[in-house]
Image: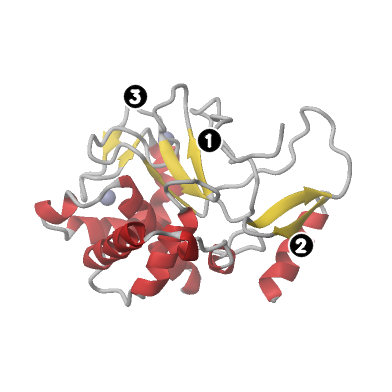
Amino acid sequence: MRWTEDLQRALSARGLTVASIPGKGRGLVATRDFYPGEVIICQEPYASAPNKVSAGSSCDGCFASSNIRKCSACRIAWYCGNACQRAEWKLHQLECQVLAALSEDRKKMLTPAIRLMVRLVLRKKLQNEKVIPTSETDNYDLVNALESHISGLDEKQLVLYAQMANLVKLVLPSLEIDLKEITHNFSKLDLLSTDQLEWIEPDSHNGAGTGVFTVPGTEPQVPAAAPSVDQDRGKGVAS
Ligand SMILES: [Zn+2]
Ligand SMILES: [Zn+2]
């Protein structure tokens, strides 16, 4: 598969390779020695969302919670300043139209997990349309290739993910939504036992946001306003 070759090429330059670990999906393996403190890899999440959607009080870009301003069009996204707003704009421009069109009742359905999946679907669309560029380490094929945990789910959990997929469809009425694909995606993020879902924490145990990382087993790149990552819940291998 092409995504595998592209990803392996990008990683081998950094002394890394991806290997399949049974039951766990892909994992990152070092092909050379790394020194203590050496950065192994930095990666932006494929999609991310702050965890305080209903309270509406952290920046979409860096999850900072002070001196932030609300997007006046959708009144859901918040930004700490122009830099984060600009960095998020290609995705938010489309998301903003979607969110602004929602009724107040529908807006209440936007839990962090739903918003994360909405953003993931929209980013896929924008990459398909080449509005947002792709790279060997940033493309939807890699999201597709994340290990699905659907076969290990009990029926209750399966129904919950299917209902969440349905909410995503309700938020995105103008898009062709494949409910099965979205249900699988929720299982990949596996909100209960996180393998691919990374928690980025600024300074406390209140998770500031969640992101989907496509290169497995990597330490998330922490935005400047978020000085530390919870090692218990982060699945990094950099230490
Ligand atoms: Zn910010
Ligand atoms: Zn907006």
The tag earlier along the polypeptide, 1 or 3, is: 3
What type is the residue that disc 1 sits on? Arg
Q: Which mark is residue 193?
A: none
Render colour scheme? secondary structure
Image location of residue 87, percent across then percent down: 46, 47
- The vertical placement of 84 against 64, above or below, is below
What type is the residue that disc 3 sits on? Ser
- What separation in Å lies between label 2 and label 1 (alpha carbons)? 26 Å
What type is the residue that disc 2 sits on? Gln
Image location of residue 21, percent across then percent down: 70, 57
- The vertical placement of 124 against 211, above or below, is below
1 vs 3, front mark: 1
The tag earlier along the polypeptide, 3 or 2, is: 2
- The vertical placement of 22 against 76, above or below, is below
Q: Secondary structure at mark 1?
A: loop
Task: Report the residue at 70% width, 44% height from top.
Answer: 41
> Which residue corresponds to mark 3?
66
- What separation in Å lies between label 3 and label 2 (alpha carbons)? 40 Å
> Which residue corresponds to mark 2?
8
Quadrant hosting residue 179: bottom left
For the C terminus, which image quadrant? Answer: top right
